[in-house]
Image: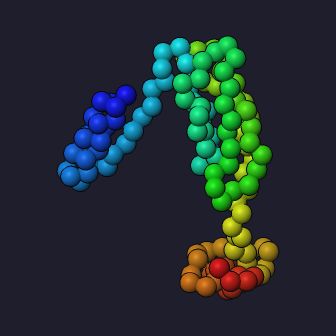
Amino acid sequence: MALLAKVLVALSLGAAAAGEALTTTTTPMPGSCFSPEVALDAETDGCSGVFPPSGTCMVQCKMGYAGAPTTYYCYVGDDAMEGVAPTCTSMVPQPKCKNFNATIMKLVPGAVQCAGSTMSEGKL
């Protein structure tokens, strides 16, 4: 594993030096389940290398989001894990337009520009 880490670091340094974007892909270990695909507000730490028939992992909301973690199950190797993603809610207040029918057009420092209303309720 240490050799693999060194190779990945060398490859990433080479790509960075060449000005190339670095992308990574994950291939599960043979016989294990694929990690669950979840929304950007959740994380699947600990979901790689899970084996059937009774393998499980917890999927939880990322920092800055609230929600109960959920369990994913690995029933069949070389297949996707099964489960229901957590419902994650941002803990950062979202800007709102004074007129609830208005649409947020763009964020500006200290306020929100809205169609039909110019300022947000409260400060950003």
Residue at (75, 82) in percent of width and height: 121
Image colouring: rainbow
Q: Quadrant of residue 70?
A: top right
Of the 4 image quadrants, the one containing the C terminus is bottom right
Name the foreground residue: 49 vs 110: 49
Which percent across, then down, holds residue 50?
A: 59, 23
Which percent across, then down, holds residue 1?
A: 37, 28
Which percent across, then down, holds residue 118?
A: 67, 86
Q: Quadrant of residue 9?
A: top left
Residue 116 seen in the figure:
no
Number of marks in the rendered image: 0
**Vertically, is 75 above or below 116?**
above
- Side of 32 where 99 appears, left or right: right
Residue at (65, 59) in percent of width and height: 64
Which percent across, then down, holds residue 21?
A: 31, 49
**Vertically, is 99 above or below 76?**
below
- Side of 30 where 39 appears, left or right: right
Residue at (71, 70) in percent of width and height: 93
Residue at (53, 14) in percent of width and height: 31
**Vertically, is 80 above or below 90?**
above
- Side of 122 where 110 appears, left or right: left
